[in-house]
Amino acid sequence: LTSGSVFSGLRDLWLPMIGGVLAVKAIGLSDAYFIGQLGEEPLAAVSYTFPITMLLISLAIGLSSGASSVLSRRIGASANKDDKKAIVLGTMALSLGLAIIMGVIGALVIGSVFSLMGASGDILADATSYMQIWFAGALFLILPIVANGLLRATGDGISPAVLMSGIAVLNIAINPLLIFGVGIFPDLGMHGAAVATVFARAVATLGAIALLMHKDLLSVSLQRLKDSVRDWSEIVRIAAPASLSTSLNPF
């Protein structure tokens, strides 16, 4: 990012991400299509979850922006390998902690949130159960998004795009298997879409961690984790307003 033309640098990050973002957006369309075949009430129930899931993703994107900004500027300032590893490890640890907090709080209050939105009866019960599955896998939602931001900070636009596309393909492929109970798969109804999402993102999380380790950006060390805490305030300083701005639309 410190050599070559600005246009080529932006192009190499921007073009692959178009495909990745479109692929991820297709997951919601897939969920609606398959769940719609179950009837009106399941489709209504999953429709209540869309703004909530968009809100969670927006918060994760904000955290990813903060981490990407800090790491890319350190790389531009010729940071050494240990410093870069400390930022990556600290960011992943911070993301893990926030995911756990988000998952616990979300699972406790989501029923009340849907009630305020107007859901009731079976629709309320189905939407609440759907999101509780999401919240149980909150760390798999946040970690790959943050890891993608860290990878882009190194100038790599291809790997995150491939990872995002892989999430979408896997998720869409197993959606009907779990929703309708094809072959050895259980018939989970609309909740099968949530299980498929968590599973696909869990695979993506493992893939993202493997990529970070392959690029020699991530290794676990207690001392390095302690050193990384000093970067949290800088990450949050950028992530907080970024999360707020991106979450306004789903809110």
Image: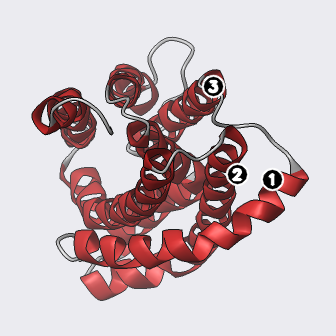
**Residue at the outermost bottom position:** 116
Q: Between marks 1 and 2, how big is the CA–CA gap?
A: 5 Å
Mark 1 vs mark 3: which is more N-terminal?
3
**Residue type, label 2:** Ala
Q: Is residue 245 left or right of residue 67?
A: left
Q: Is residue 39 above or below residue 115?
A: above
Q: Secondary structure at mark 2?
A: helix
Q: Residue at x 63, y 54 (%)?
A: 87
Give the labeled residue for mark 2.
86
Q: Between marks 1 and 3, how big is the CA–CA gap?
A: 19 Å
Which dot marks residue 210? 3
Q: Position of residue 235 (x, y in %)?
A: 51, 68
Give the labeled residue for mark 1.
224
Mark 1 vs mark 2: which is more N-terminal?
2
**Residue at the outermost right position:** 222
Q: Position of residue 66 (x, y in %)?
A: 43, 63
Q: For marks 1 and 3, give the one nearer the viewer.
A: 1
